[in-house]
Image (cartoon, rainbow, N blue to C red):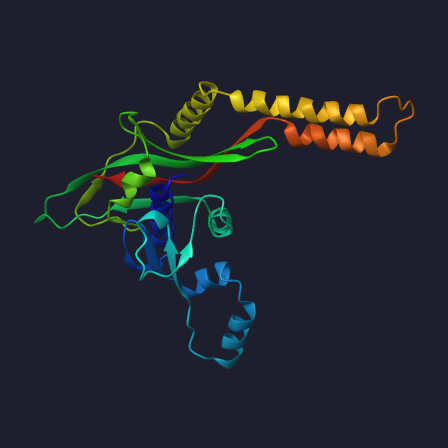
């Protein structure tokens, strides 16, 4: 997952949850949390218990996330966030807990009574995890035009450049989709599965070679032992599970987006 993908995800996450973005650049984002979001991700229950019991004025946290340290200025201080970091995993989990589907509209100016047509798109963010004794995670963001079936890769990044809101602007007309979202989702799932099938799976072969090497060591250690102890079977099973090559496809979040 590239820094720009993470940056786009943070933008979308906080916008969807009504957290004001106070300042940002292409490598950092400064955000004012809502009370609800502070309670969810800041892990300070005693603070909020005290605030609520005393009636004191709430003061939710402001956070600065650094998404690309290569572009970092010396005067920017904040939390470095990258794919696999605890904070990003926490936000993924928060997305799942709060609901992973949104419906948003591209905001447009009032064109003197002229209606602007908004086209429906289905956008889905996938996380692909490649498991063996080594783990790799990759993020795919796909969008499909529900009128034409046009597929757009990097959909999340394109959304980050738009002014989106949860309320449909006045003087707009939403085109009814001709492709049902559930059918579009099936097509996007197929795109992901086909992409995985076409990849080079040398990593799985290499994992099997490492498994064989460690298995040989284990067998050598117990060579000549007729009545092998239980710990041998436990270690052999653990080794099989550790090196087993498998792929997991997850949907992080998605939504229906009406765009110009």
In this rendering, position of residue 104 left or right of residue 46: left
- Name the outermost residue toward the right: 227
Q: Residue at x 42, y 68 (%)?
A: 60
Q: Residue at x 79, y 24 (%)?
A: 220
- In the picture, the quarter occupied by the C terminus is top left
- Name the outermost residue toward the left: 112
Q: Nearer the viewer, residue 176 or 222?
A: 222
Report x, y in % for residue 146.
Answer: 30, 30
Q: Nearer the viewer, residue 174 or 58?
A: 58
Q: From the viewer's perspective, is residue 16 above or below residue 141?
A: below
Q: Residue at x 33, y 27 (%)?
A: 179
Report x, y in % for residue 140.
Answer: 40, 33
Report x, y in % for residue 231.
Answer: 83, 34
Q: For residue 68, say whether it is visible.
A: no
Q: For residue 129, say whether it is visible.
A: yes
In which quarter of the view is residue 256 placed?
A: top left
- Name the outermost residue toward the top: 198
Q: Residue at x 76, y 29 (%)?
A: 236
In this rendering, position of residue 135 left or right of residue 68: right
In this rendering, position of residue 110 left or right of residue 9: left
Report x, y in % for residue 17.
Answer: 38, 55
In which quarter of the view is residue 31 placed?
A: bottom left
């Amino acid at each position: 997952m590239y820094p720009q993908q993470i940056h786009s995800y943070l933008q979308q996450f906080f916008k969807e949850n009504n957290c004001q973005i106070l300042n940002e650049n292409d490598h950092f984002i400064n955000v004012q949390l809502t009370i609800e979001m502070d309670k969810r991700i800041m892990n300070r229950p005693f603070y909020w218990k005290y605030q609520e019991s005393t009636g004191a004025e709430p003061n939710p946290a402001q956070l600065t996330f650094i998404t690309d340290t290569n572009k970092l200025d010396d005067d920017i201080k904040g939390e470095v966030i990258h794919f696999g970091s605890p904070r990003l995993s926490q936000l993924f989990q928060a997305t799942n807990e709060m609901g992973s589907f949104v419906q948003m509209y591209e905001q447009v100016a009032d064109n003197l009574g002229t209606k602007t047509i908004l086209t429906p798109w289905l956008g889905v963010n996938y996380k692909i995890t490649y498991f063996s004794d080594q783990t790799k995670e990759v993020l795919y963001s796909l969008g499909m035009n529900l009128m034409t079936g046009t597929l757009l890769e990097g959909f999340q990044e394109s959304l980050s450049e738009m002014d989106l809101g949860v309320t449909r602007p006045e003087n707009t007309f939403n085109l009814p989709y001709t492709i049902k979202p559930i059918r579009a989702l099936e097509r996007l799932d197929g795109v992901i599965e086909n992409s995985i099938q076409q990849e080079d799976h040398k990593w799985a072969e290499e994992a099997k070679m490492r498994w064989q090497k460690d298995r040989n060591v284990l067998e050598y250690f117990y060579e000549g032992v007729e009545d092998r102890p239980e710990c041998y079977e436990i270690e052999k099973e653990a080794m099989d599970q550790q090196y087993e090559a498998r792929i997991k496809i997850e949907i992080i979040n998605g939504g229906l987006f009406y765009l110009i």
